[in-house]
Image: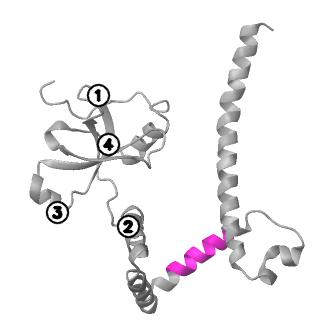
Amino acid sequence: MTTAHVKRYFLTGLLILVPLGITVWVITALVGFMDQTLLLLPEHWRPEYWLGFRIPGLGVLLTIVVVLVTGLLAGNLLGQRMVRMWESMLNRIPVVKSIYGSVKQVSDTLLSGNGHAFRKVVLVRYPHPEAWSLAFQTNVPNEVKDELGEEWLAVFIPTAPSPVNGFYFYVKRSETIEMDISVDLALKYIVSMGVAAPQTKALANTYPGD
């Protein structure tokens, strides 16, 4: 076996084991985090109290049950009143009001079935006029729309490989290119830094003047 063969086999092993190891690590971390919900139970109600040993993953089941029960309770008229009372109380606390209000607005936009987290995928000139970056069209606040007009778009430019971080800009509609791809596919491009991007058509339109 030559050195070239050893190097090829080693790289092949890395390509198999690295994604598998990272996946196992992420799942283990999530399960461990969710298992912390068991600490909310009284000590004599916890599974290890009755079984004598700890079973990883039971916290996941408890988390799912808590989420489902919360949704069930909030789905009826009495539950909705309780939620409004709870939010009204939180909105009276100065610091909590700002944090809870911001998080609530983002979660409503991202998780609500009728919300629009990201409308379209577009290309914008960033970080300089000779470069293009994937961006997501979002909502323009009415106050900004009144100042800038309808020809401006609000876009979120995510960073790779972590799309939860990025920049929020207002750009002219005429200086963007609308992409004929889904938001999910664009996120895959960003997370993989283009490595996992298939060789498909790149642009839905051509840039004006090019």
Image quarter of residue 60 = bottom right
Residue at 28% across, 32% down = 203
Q: From the viewer's perspective, is 131 left or right of 61? A: left
Q: Earlier in the sequence, mark 2 or mark 1?
A: 2
Is residue 156 placed above or below 198 in the rendered structure?
Answer: below
Instruction: Give yes or no for contact between labels 1 and 4 (Cβ–Cβ under 8 Å).
Output: no
| Marks 2/1: CA–CA distance | 32 Å
| Marks 2/3: CA–CA distance | 18 Å
Instruction: Give yes or no for contact between labels 1 and 3 (Cβ–Cβ under 8 Å).
Output: no
Frontmost of labels 4 and 2 is 2
* Dominant secondary structure, magenta: helix
Amino acid, disc 1:
Ala
Frontmost of labels 1 and 4 is 1
Is residue 111 placed above or below 174 in the rendered structure?
Answer: below
Q: Which residue is mark 1?
A: 131
Q: Which residues are magenta?
A: 61-71
Q: Which residue is mark 3?
A: 142
Image quarter of residue 166 = top left
- SS at badge 3: helix
Instruction: Give percent across and percent down for residue 58.
Output: 73, 68
Frontmost of labels 2 and 3 is 2
Crowdedness near tag 3: few (<14), some (14–19) or many (≥20) residues, C-alpha within 10 Å: few
| Marks 4/2: CA–CA distance | 22 Å
Q: Earlier in the sequence, mark 3 or mark 4?
A: 4
Q: Which residue is mark 4?
A: 135
Say if the magenta span includes residue 48. Answer: no
Q: From the viewer's perspective, is 156 left or right of 15? A: left
Amino acid, disc 2:
Ser
Image quadrant in which the N terminus is located: top right
